Amino acid sequence: MYYYIVDTSKLTQRQFDRVQQELYSSIADYHIPGEIVRTTGIRTIKQLVETAFFHQAKTIVAVGTDETLDSIINIVGDRPMIIGYIPLVATELAKAFGIASISQACKALGLRRVEEIDLGVVNGISFLTKLTFGLDLKGKDSFDFFGLGFIKQLINKPTFQVSFNADHYHADSEVWGGLIINCQNHKCDKTLGKPTDGLLDVVLVPKLSRSELFSHRRNILDGCFEKVPGASIMHLAALEITNLSGLPLKIESTEVTSTPAKIEVKPKALKMIVGRERKF
Amino acid sequence: MARNDIPETIVSAGMRIEGELKSNGNIRIDGIVSGKVQTSQDLVLGATAQIDADLIAANAFISGTVKGNVTVKNSLSITETGRILGNIVCARISIHEGGVFNGNCIMREIKPSEAPKVESRNLEAGI
């Protein structure tokens, strides 16, 4: 049985009204009926996930945004459950999984192609996409087309020292920020962020000059920091950021923990329904 | 250098690594590394690289400074800014004018199976 958890907390009522009809008709069209529940102020995602287990659901479908999916993955934890995802807004993650639209996602659910996906874990919190530090990209979409306002904001951004222990070495670097990628935005380097390779890709971003910022603004706005000059790139199964300064670590602009932090990949930890057009 | 499916490891100029850096893909180093560097593919040291370590790679292109032994399966190239202070084991070597090498060099023989393939039509044409 499919157990659909519809999370509209990140959508306006108008946005939800627009996609609601498409959602219900696609579920009917692809013959994937199940129980559909919606989060409210008093019915949290956590309560609904526990209800799904109580009802012995075989598949929980996150209906909402990437944050909805991340929340459900964390609440499910190590318990056996197949996860589906119907994005109500266009997201890069949905594109990476080959389920860019509601209709495509429902079709994928109907075909039920289950892939075993790696999960990143930071201080016990799971993440599917990437963990960032020092690179606050919040608000980048609200700036002008060329992203000049956003770039202006970055020019005076200070650097800081980051130290980490990896497999057999210790590394230090003066950076502007960094990313630890499990699953990558499809616009970026195709060899990075494969969620089936059993590795996390670490990208450390140095301070960029004004001209470098301007010429690489598109890569920065797309979050493809591995393409900026002077970026360090490593591929690790586990690392420990040893900074004692309480450096905030974020998933999708939400602070989830701070340093010092142990980060590792849990290979094939998540069973997820993906589309045929997936990018990995 | 041909890019393959295994992503490249890049240690950029502001980075310092102590320990053993291993990879199955290409490695590019512009920073400071002490310990050991090992890859089954190509290793590129930029002009700003300072390595106090033993290096093991399939091919190596040295433009920075290396204090340590270098073991390369195939080809080793020391460019104008490259400096190696240590011993070398390789099959082929090229040192550009200005490149520095202080140490012993052992040239290993390439087995016929490892030799680069020459296209048969070139042989027929006598090229």
Image (tube, helix red, strand yellow):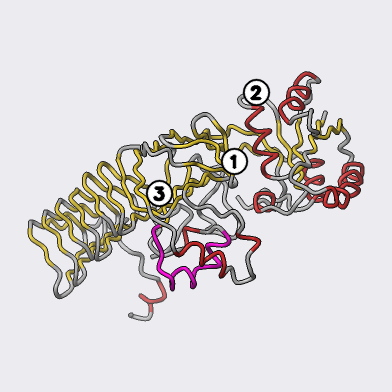
Q: Mark 2 lies on which chain?
A: A
Type of amino acid at the residue the image marks with label 2: Arg
Q: Identify the secondary structure beneath mark 2.
A: loop
Question: Residue at left 71%, top 27%?
Answer: A46
| Magenta residues, dominant SS class | helix
Q: Could you classify mark 1 by the number of other residues whose Cα lies within 10 Å: few (under 14), some (14-19), or many (20 or more)? A: many
Q: What residue type is labelled 3?
A: Met
Q: Position of residue B76 (x, y in %)?
A: 23, 62
Quarter where residue B94 is shown: bottom left
N-terminal of the pair, mark 3 or mark 2, is 2
- Which residue is found at the position 31% from the left and 53% from the top? B15
**Residue wearing tag 2:** A79
* Inter-mark Cα distance, 3 to 2: 31 Å
- Give the amino acid at mark 1: Leu
The quarter of the picture where the N terminus of chain B appears is bottom left
N-terminal label among 1 and 3 = 1
Over which residues does the magenta segment extend? A206-222
